[in-house]
Amino acid sequence: MWFFRSPQIVFGEDSLSFLNTLDAGRIVIVTDKNILGSGLIDRVKKNLPENAETFVISDILPEPDYDNMLLHLDDVKKFNPDLFIGAGGGSSMDTAKILFALYERQDIKVYDITPLVKLNLRKKSHLIAIPTTSGTGSECSWAAVVSEKNEYRKNELASPEILPDYAILDPEMVLSLPREQTINTSVDAMTHAIESYVAKWANPYSDALAEKALELISNNILNVLSNPENVDSRNNVHIGASMAGMSFSNSQIGLAHALGHSFGAVFKIAHGKTVGLFLPEVIRYNYKSSKNKYDKLNSIFPDNIRKPSLDMTVENLFKKIGQPVKMNAMSINEDYYSQNFDLLVELAENSTGIITNPEDIDREGIETIFKKVHGD
Amino acid sequence: MASFPGPEWADEYVKALNGNSEYKDAGKTWEGDITFVVQPDDRYSKKWYLYLDLFHGECRSYKASDNENDIKKSEFRYTGPYSNWVKLINKEIDPIQGLMTGKFKLEGPMMKIMRYTKAAKEMVNTASLVKTEFEA
């Protein structure tokens, strides 16, 4: 027995106008200062029902810890909302999920948000996610990533009940996404699709979404980078990224995420960049057990990118978009790397991505992949 | 061949767990006890408990019994019907999917155990290493 879970998806041009059809009068919007400053929240507000009152939380930090996420919980309770909107990248959407859960259930603690506890949410409010990047997949997932203060570790809080009711995928919200973030988040999305496709929990639903996600992203990402304001290409990558998010949310991620989480936490490098860094080497590690599925994915890439095997194809596409696949291309501090090598291995070893990777891996195997990507 | 559930199986399991270097490494900072609880079903009519005192990658002591009163109260309990334990030992059920689909129940502080996913996985892997015979 297994499940397929998804929010209702509103997509395409003008999909923000869906907000106006909602029966909501007191709305909490969770975002960050950059998104607020870009004017995107004004667009969201313009589409809200007439006379709706809003309470905007705009100080969510990248990779927030519990303190940052819960800073305004008391204010939220006083505001008494009937709708939460997470508008931004993964951090804002994940914070909206946590605030929503703790507002709905004021008797629980953040650690009670697990798939093993029935929370009975949605007695007072609902949850909408509006991504402003094309990659995290948070709008379609039932997890929220929370950093631990003064630690390298991140926790993944998960409950089917924090899956948004709606995900709104309006290409207007990503048209001005900077080039670097466009690359990082698209690499994250492609890694979601490839890892979910071969994960131990992969299933026909997650497979179908991963295939289509990869098709949409690989056929459009180069055009997005050369014509960032091309709405059709942006829309395709945006939809592809959400499909990849839905795919991994229903089958889980793998070793590239385990290694990338570890490397990103220690070196403070963007998530998409670090998971992509390890992806080709992880594909090579898994090739024996996943050859047929990898070959199928390889056939999906456009002819001008495809190479004889998936690892080579991914490297080729990454090279074209400027995603590194070796650490020496990232100018890391070599002394810091050597000093923290054991920590890097340990963090990867305890990441949940290890559990669902198609091939088991031990400490020595993790060390070997780090060394290969380092160029030893 | 050790019969599951039973004292011989408990002996063999703990021996295998303490010989598992991957578990020793993954659980090297873990301090806490857990009880495996087998619930009766169509194939097995009794309850069975295996208490494990786990400390820094090692099982320091253990006790198996079909009487709950013989067993210390532990921080965690991992509970499921006999037939699901058979599937788990035979690697036919993923232990985490088993929890999420209600085939097993885990009681205890979730935040603590979430930090030890690898150790939890190795505990299950170890069960499948024990040469086991089951009730018909």
Image (tube, rainbow, N blue to C red):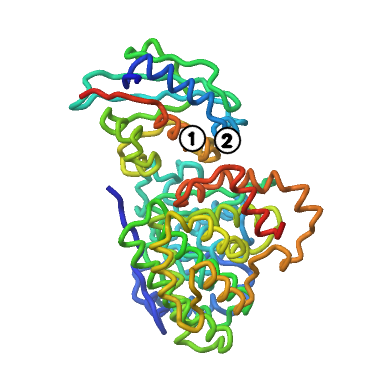
Percent coordinates x, y for residue A312 in the rendering: 54, 70
Q: Is residue A348 visible?
A: yes
Residue at the image point whose x is 56% and y is 86% from the top = A228
* Parent chain of label 1: B
Percent coordinates x, y for residue A36 in the rendering: 60, 73
Q: Residues within 10 Å of mark 2 (few under 14, many from 20)?
A: many
Against A339, is A26 above or below? Answer: below
Element class at badge 1: helix
Which numbered disc, 1 or 2, marks the residue that appears first in the sequence?
Answer: 2
Percent coordinates x, y for residue A337 in the rendering: 75, 53
Q: Amino acid at mark 2?
A: Ala
Using the image, tell me which numbered label, if any, was put on residue B26: 2
Residue at the image point whose x is 42% and y is 67% from the top = A295
Foreground pick, A38 / B83:
B83
Q: Amino acid at mark 1?
A: Glu
Residue at the image point whose x is 64% and y is 61% from the top = A61
Using the image, tell me which numbered label, if any, was put on residue B122: 1
Determine whether, in the image, residue B75 is placed left or right of residue A37. left
Determine whether, in the image, residue A62 is placed left or right of residue A209. right
* Parent chain of label 2: B
Against A12, is B101 above or below? Answer: above
Using the image, tell me which numbered label, if any, was put on residue A169: none
In which quarter of the view is residue A261 placed? bottom right
Q: Residue furthest left?
A: B42
